[in-house]
Amino acid sequence: MRSSQFFLPTLRENPAEAEIVSHRLMLRAGMVRQASAGIYSWLPLGFKVLKNVERIVREEQDRAGCQEVLMPTIQSADLWRESGRYDAYGKEMLRIKDRREREMLYGPTNEEQITQIFRDSIRSYREVPKMLYHIQWKFRDEVRPRFGVMRGREFLMKDAYSFDMDYEGARRAYNKFFVAYLRTFARMGMRAIPMEADTGPIGGNLSHEFIVLADTGESQVYCDREFLDFDVLGKDINYADPAAVEKVVNHFTSLYARTDEKNDQAAFEQQVPEARRYVGRGIEVGHIFYFGTKYSEPLKAQVQDKDGNPVTIHMGSYGIGVSRMPAAIIEASHDDNGIIWPETVAPFRVGLINIKVDDKAGTAMAEDIYAKLNNAGVEVLYDDRDERAGAKFAEMDLIGLPWQLVVGPRGAAKGQVEMKNRKTGEKVELSVDAVLQRLGA
Ligand code: ATP
Ligand code: MG
């Protein structure tokens, strides 16, 4: 993509309405624009990141054996009356009437919808277990939408649901999601720590919030540093082997990790040696929950067991804040000059700057690199505009592409390009061939 053609409305000044760094940077980098309170449009740069996040989430759900569906955004009020949540949900739910005065709603979540689908289709224990997910927009009329896409009213969520015959089966499903979440966030370059969360009246210990560490996060966290060193991507996890999955889960659940809501300082100090205590801040990016028969009971989702007896299905739900994720990543990965994208979610892998567009040798070199990267399938944003070099550098740093290539008259004369790592700031002078080789092109 050429900057001269790309729709990238960057802002030089910090927008006054943005209170946190990710919101400021997302507006300044031209990633999103507010449509109305808590409702955003995603512009090309932001949308590319959102799609990368979505892709990683999808790949890890698929890998864990979860199957993708797509449920509607609009649901019927009657379905929610069956679970009793239509009245209970309150003002967060956006209620709508169609032309026949039928009550509808814009889904804030999909437990009822998925339970209906399951109940109408599955009859026998032979078709269980099942895990289904979708990635869909939700609407919650939050009292205080704020921090841009971090707490929106309309937001994109991955929500998955598991169906099992009993608690043991549900626990195995829970474990799979637990591991899939560790992998998902790690692939985005994030440390997301599973923290024991409230399970509500059903009790048990089966709810975890996944918290990405970021100094600017909303929650205070207390955890064992072991979490920071564990390399889940290095582990070869076979989801078909429940014992292997359980082992990873047990490792984590045996370590202390609580947000301030649930922290018990005495227990923290007793369980974690001082050198391993980590106190910091974080952002909730995912939440997994086993809730038993909470919805299957009122919605009568039953299947027949081996002996032909009806069994009420055990369920869990598993959310990831897909549209919150780009903001959470920025909170965890930025500096004074702008965003620092991890390679896996970056909107382009490379930013190519031609310092002086009226220099023949430099422009020929930049065009050559641009064509070769494109041919090799390396995503590159090529700043070919007739602008001040300083402004180009500042914009590249702001939008945070992992690699910057700088071509100027002096280097071009020697056949050299400058390659800068956005994260470390490290710069090297290389030949065009060497640059292409480093980028795998
Ligand atoms: P919170 O406690 O932040 O209000 P929640 O418990 O209501 O979240 P869940 O229903 O567990 O959220 O939703 C799953 C995930 O969706 C959350 O972990 C979060 O990442 C994301 N999410 C929830 N509400 C919002 C929102 N208003 N805007 C953006 N993402 C959200
Ligand atoms: Mg939650």
Image (cartoon, rainbow, N blue to C red):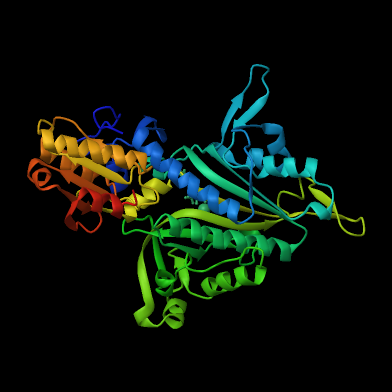
Residue at far top of view: 99
Q: Residue at x 54, y 46 (%)?
A: 158
In the image, residue 356 above or below residue 58: above
Residue at far right of view: 307
Q: Horizontal and vertical percent for residue 435?
A: 25, 51
Q: Horizontal and vertical percent for residue 251?
A: 53, 74
Q: Horizontal and vertical percent for residue 353?
A: 19, 40
Q: Residue at x 52, y 71 (%)?
A: 252
Q: Horizontal and vertical percent for residue 44?
A: 36, 33
Q: Is residue 111 visible?
A: yes
Between 253 and 266, the residue placed more toward the observer is 253
Between 30 and 15, the residue placed more toward the observer is 30
In the image, 11: left or right of 280? left
In the image, residue 184 above or below residue 39: below
Q: Looking at the rendering, in which quadrant would you find the N terminus?
A: top left
Q: Residue at x 63, y 61 (%)?
A: 174
